[in-house]
Amino acid sequence: MTRDNFENLENQKFLLKKTTSIEEQIARYVLVTQKYAQKGYLEAVEKVQINDKIENLLLAGNKNLINELVKCNDLTSEGKLISDGFMEIFFDKYHWSSTCFVASDGLNALGSARLITKDSRGLPTFDDPGISIFDEYKFLYQEDCVEFSQFVVKDGMCTHISVGLLKLAYQYSMSVMRIKKWVATIDNSVLKFLNSRFFNFDLMAIGPCAYYLGSECTPVIIDLDCAIENSAKHESSRQIAEYILDNNNEGYGDIEIVY
């Protein structure tokens, strides 16, 4: 790597925001699809060809129109691989009950996360038949919570993007949604990372390990107050906790968050 390339990398800035345009939605979906395919998550997912543009699928709000576009009775919790002949995206029925976040360098989507709210579609962790919840945690079905999902970062990107996405989702959940609890069914390797000394979130399993979307995953409860409090207790993760709380942005000058 030349000195100029190194300096460009050092000076690179990343914008993190809630998706608002159709272009941002598509870019995020393409990134998620590529990452899932790379990890082998989509090998058993049904592929559906549509005769309309994916853009129109994302814009459509009528369920009957959606069913007509994908030529199936319903979109399942695990979703389908939708192709319009030009691009393909992994797509599920939670699109219309999700708030999505994207990280970019101004040109390309580099990171993704989403929060799914409860509505008639439910939440994947509670409603997918392949995921079980321990009896002692079934009270969560009645709790005011959202689901955290599609948390991916493009290979080779700095960990600041992952931390920034967590901060953006945390701040949005606490300040806009007024919701302090998330559920998630997380790839075990990602769960290990979130519970490592880097984050120290100490996320608790609420059900047995399950084979979900092509990998071994574990359903967890994420009590935001408890997770951040636990992270702040440890020297190795205290700076991250302070950053997520928006108390100290030192060291994250490459991340710009738009709320």
Image (cartoon, rainbow, N blue to C red):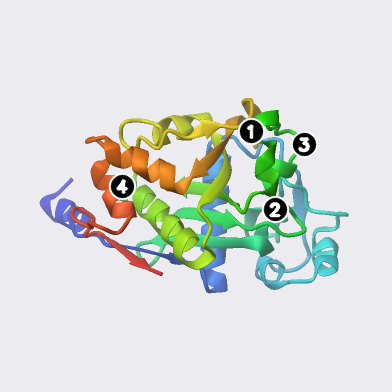
Task: Write down the residue under mark 4.
Answer: 241
Query: Considering the numbered disc 2 on the image, is that residue within a helix, a strand or a loop?
Result: loop
Residue mark closest to the camera, 4 vs 2: 4
Q: Is residue 163 above or below residue 210?
A: below
Disc 1 to disc 3, how far (Cα)? Answer: 15 Å
Disc nearer the start of the sequence (2/3): 2
Residues marked 3 and 4 touching at CB (< 8 Å): no
Report x, y in % for residue 116.
61, 56
Residue 92's tag is 2
Disc 2 to disc 3, how far (Cα)? Answer: 15 Å
Task: Write down the residue under mark 3.
Answer: 129
Residues marked 1 and 2 touching at CB (< 8 Å): no
Report x, y in % for residue 83.
70, 56
Q: Is residue 102 above or below residue 204?
A: below
Q: What residue is drawn where x is 22% and y is 56%? A: 248
Q: What residue is drawn where x is 42% and y is 60%? A: 171
- Identify the residue at the far left of this view: 3
Disc 1 to disc 2, how far (Cα)? Answer: 15 Å
Residues marked 2 and 3 touching at CB (< 8 Å): no
